[in-house]
Amino acid sequence: MKTVHLIQHTHWDREWYFTENDSRVVLYYFMADLLQRLEADESLGPFILDGQTVVLEDYFNIAPENRARVQKLIDEGRLLIGPWYTQTDFLVVGAESITRNLLLGMADCNAMGSRMSVGYVPDSFGQSAQLPMFLTQFAMDRAVIWRGWCEHGVAASEFRWQSADGSCVTTAVLPWGYGCAKWLPTDAQKAWQVLPGILQKQAKFSTSGHVLLPNGNDQSPFEHGVPAMLDALNTQQSDYHFVRSDFNRYFAALERTGVELATYQGELLSPKYMRIHRGIFSTRMDIKQANVRLENFLSQQLEPLLSVVWQLGLPYPQTAVENIWREAMKSHAHDSIGGCNADRVNAMVKARLTSGHESASQLFDLNMKMLAEGIAARQQGKKIIVFNPLPYARDGRVALTIYVPGAHFAIVDDAGQPCRWQIVQEEQQDMSVIVQELSNSTTTVWYRKCDIILEAKALPACGYQTLYLQEDAPAGFTVPQETIAALDNPWLCLTLTDGHISLLDKRSGKQWNAILRLVDGGDAGDNYNYSPPEDDWRVTSDGALVSAIWQRDALADTLNLSWCIAAPQDLAARQQHRRNGQLNVSMTIALDRDRPLLDVQVRIDNTLRDHRLQLEIPTGISGMFHFADQPFGLIRRENRPQALDIWQQEQWTEAPASLWPMQSLAMMHDEQHGMCVVTDGLREYEIPADRPDTLAITLLRSVGWLGQPDMPWRPGRASGMVLPSPDSQLPGRFDCHLALVPLHQGPDAAFWRDIENWRTPASGWLDSGWSRFKTNPHGMRFPAAYSLLRWDTPLHFSTLKKAQNEEALILRGWNPGTTLLDGVEPVLSSDVARVTLAETPLSGSHTPVQPCTPVTWRITPAEKGKSDA
């Protein structure tokens, strides 16, 4: 006899083809019914509230009077909440976002007095290999998942899942999903007509006599009559014994069986039994970029700045920052961040992320303003504060916008020595639009608005230095004037021949031809999946170059390219091989004097429909595997998934195509030479089947439907709803930013340092004397240069922030590569201690650091408000 564990739950999508406004109204009546049913019958429960505390947050916003009723049911263990704040995606959102999701979910659960201590992930579109690590760091050693598993990876539906750092969680799969036992009849005889088939499927891959029976569905009401129906079945048959259960009781029963579970290591991306929707990595790329921009700005610019000024005596607006994170996480669920929503919902997702960035930027600006106010100027001119969030001193390139009245200006350091800079873009600016004091003036005040790149030397670790803008002064350095026909520095040389770009690595003599080639193909898919048309006619940038302008400047040389690609306007024209549309693309390639990498900016004027634009980078590496980054680590993947040979024969739900997610990086190398591509907000790459040595970075994917049925790579029913989604065609201007980093001695320390410096630049702020908002003087004094701490480590910086529950700071880094790294302590005049991602004490050795492993330090600061100049 098998024991069947009834798991009663609801799966709560906050938004999808409906808006969060719709779901909140439904939630009010769902919770009213749930509370009434549980209170009326104390034998009912436990009930799982989808493992995300945002459901309660939403409910208390519309029914605060019922908090005590909810609290009582939680105290009784009949309503189970957490551990997540929202049911986050694991393949598209960043590592810090996943960490904060669990941190805020834990805080919410602690406030309510209880947390479900199981990593419940019912509907993520694939599972990161890092999930066991995240759960273990938050004191959870059990997980329940759905999508991504099949027996070709690990034979049983219960197994030990291990991350690269050694963290291991006992994992149970819901083979047929969280809704496999939804809407059961309450009549025992009628229920018995459907239950045996459900239970046989649930137990098909089980190694024990215990079976999970999830009873619930999307926004589905409490099926309160099911427990009594199963009690009746217990007296009418002897094949199964039904118990009212939860995940912890199930795992305890599984452990008592003593069954030996297999161990699995890696990600779970198989679409054999359930679709994982690989297209969501590139759907609504504008939303992906907005999310990355917010995530990175919060964790790697704003929070480190707030930590520095907090140590100097300014307040840390922790709740304001936390609220920005919460709003961002409301856009991190699989549908939301995936972009597989109705157009109205996608607009709301993007608006939340844009709004969060506005709030974060204002916090950054005001704290820079207060910092500059407390610094006594040592040179003439307007102060420029250059902030370095990385925990080591470095030279940096700083993007900065300045407004000057005349044709000349200089930027000097603390000693009055000129700093080099170059103008990236310039235009005239009506200052009354920016400066409140000028808004009522009858005279227009025109200034030059200059976007510049500034060279900043010897930036303090986790700190800042002060420079000075001197108007109407000579720059103090000479800009090279000679004509160039190549981008050339001590490491690399880029040339253009007959419209094709070639790159030479001078260190090895390795040359890559026809790099940065634009390839546009059709997309007959939807917001969930890319789908190649049956007859895909691909057009390229070959022969379409209309201009190439070389420019020599103070810090970097650039090549500006423009293409006018005649292309099909839509799928019908593509099928007929008609070039009745036009795709205009411009690209700026910059080669810095002091770095062995190419910086690439791409601007697309998208007027086409139902297409996918990729940037192809040949690597010259013929092998079976490549690498990409994942949250807090690197992962090795097959160039061509072996499952492609069997998926149609076994009737998989979706093709296991060689379309992959990345955080920001993909590379191929042979332990010595190779090519790495680093992106700013682009999350998808492909290894083309006919060019296995090529990285194809998806720049843009344009489709017009939320869901469609019967696609070649995803046969059968439509995913989601068959609704038009014209906004997902992404018409208009679209910008991309990426870098190419050739490998010379494999992924060594110098390579990883170049990657980190590109991904986490220093930031600058000009104290113009004008301000959109006024603040009273704070009367504090700060040094002109300051370093909070130093952490000379090959680990990559993740964040520096205020601790969640105490007057301390949290410093975090992670091992980006595949080898052991030293995990030295940070250097500062404060107490430091290792902690987990959950910010709880961590015992054991501090070194070495395994691959795919974060390292977190709690810093108890010295007396705040005191600093050395």
Image (cartoon, rainbow, N blue to C red):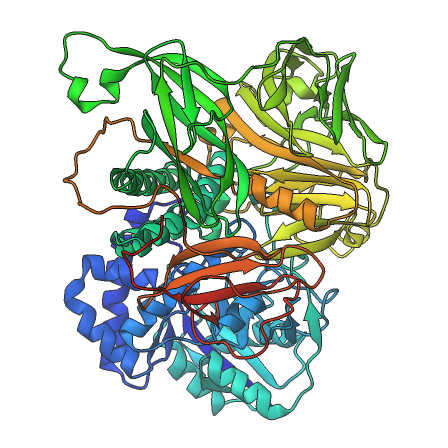
Q: Nearer the viewer, residue 32 or 248?
A: 248
Q: Give the tally of numbered discs.
A: 0
Q: Quadrant of residue 583?
A: top right
Q: Is residue 773 above or below residue 584?
A: below
Q: Quadrant of residue 550?
A: top right
Q: Is residue 352 above or below residue 70?
A: above
Residue 158 visible, this angle: no
Give the image location of residue 796, x and y in percent.
57, 53
Q: Is residue 39 above or below residue 577?
A: below
Q: In which quadrant of the rendered image does the N terminus lie?
A: bottom right
Q: Nearer the viewer, residue 863 or 274?
A: 863
Give the image location of residue 111, x and y in percent.
27, 72
Residue most toward the front? 415
Q: Is residue 803 above or below residue 198?
A: above
Q: Nearer the viewer, residue 427 or 655?
A: 427
Residue 736 visible, this angle: yes
Give the image location of residue 646, x and y in percent.
80, 54
